[in-house]
Image: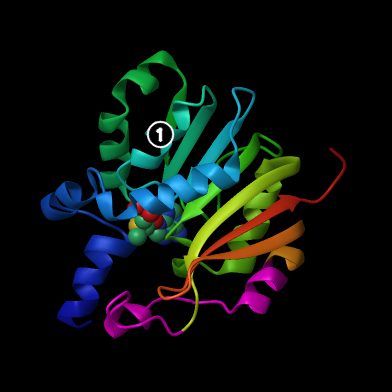
Amino acid sequence: MTIADMVADRLLQRPRGRIARMWWRDMKAHHGIFRDTLEALDLTPDDHLLEIGCGGGTFVKWALETGCRATAVDHSVDMVELAKTNNADAVRAGGLDVVSAPAENLPFPEGQFTCAALMNVLFFLDAPAALAELKRVLVPGGRVVVHTVAPNPPAKVVPPTMAKRMRLYGDDELLACFTASGFTDGHLTRIDGAYQLVIATAKAAGRV
Ligand SMILES: C[S@@+](CC[C@H](N)C(=O)[O-])C[C@H]1O[C@@H](n2cnc3c(N)ncnc32)[C@H](O)[C@@H]1O
């Protein structure tokens, strides 16, 4: 493993340690992504949101302001602790659970959530397997919003050392992953053509 690999691993793929905790306490560079994702989710107080790869928990803090309840998941123990600390009131009040778990094997029963958000994490996952697992825990008709990056991003957006660790799906491939995993109504929006950032939305198949 090179030094670049180690940094990418410790800061992005499974953030851990003091620097990672400082970095992810409130990732301001992602605020625009959080806003776009919230808009696409259109949360209501009746929703139970699942966020996968929650990092420091800023997004879920904003989501809770809609009155929904939420569960945030991350496989990094440091990020789980940070997200809990950053949302201590909501955790105490019972409106938020933060759970250490892998996206590929979620510790929840079928149909527990009405909607889900994944930002800057799908590219670390085997998308068809992770989306199939997500579909299992969503109610029929449950909606998902994914923020990810299209293939061949400019080096200033995703450095090549990082890009080679990421699975960047083309538009058709991503839509095919949704369909293969049991989602319908897949739709992609390029939120910034130059940066190739993609918001993907879909619904869990089945009767609502
Ligand atoms: C690049 S950070 C993005 C954090 C946050 N979603 C954001 O956009 O600011 C990726 C996060 O996903 C988590 N993650 C990566 N692979 C995961 C997996 N297989 N299961 C659960 N969490 C994962 C990492 O630990 C990290 O906190």
| Dot 1 alpha-carbon crowd within 10 angstroms: few under 14, some 14 to 19, many 20 or more | few
Q: Is residue 75 visible?
A: no
Residue located 81% across and 51% down the image: 205
Residue located 42% across and 53% down the image: 33
Vertical position of residue 1 compared to residue 114: above or below: below
**Any magenta on residue 96?**
no
Q: Cβ of disc 1 within 8 Å of ligand 1?
A: no
Q: Is residue 92 left or right of residue 169?
A: left
Q: Is residue 52 left or right of residue 160?
A: right
Q: Which residue is nearer to you in this view: 195 or 162?
A: 195
Which residues make up the magenta segment? 152-177
> Residue furthest toward the left?
18
The image quadrant where one finds the C terminus is: top right
Residue located 32% across and 28% down the image: 87
Mark 1 secondary-structure assignment:
helix
Vertical position of residue 42 compared to residue 28: above or below: above
Q: Which residue is labeled 1 in the image?
A: 62
Q: Which residue is nearer to you in this view: 178 or 33?
A: 33
Q: Which residue is nearer to you in this view: 129 or 56?
A: 56
Q: The residue under label 1 is which amino acid type?
A: Trp
> Residue furthest toward the right?
207
Q: Is residue 117 left or right of residue 58?
A: right
> Residue furthest toward the front?
193
Q: Is residue 149 visible?
A: yes
Residue 25 figure quarter: top left
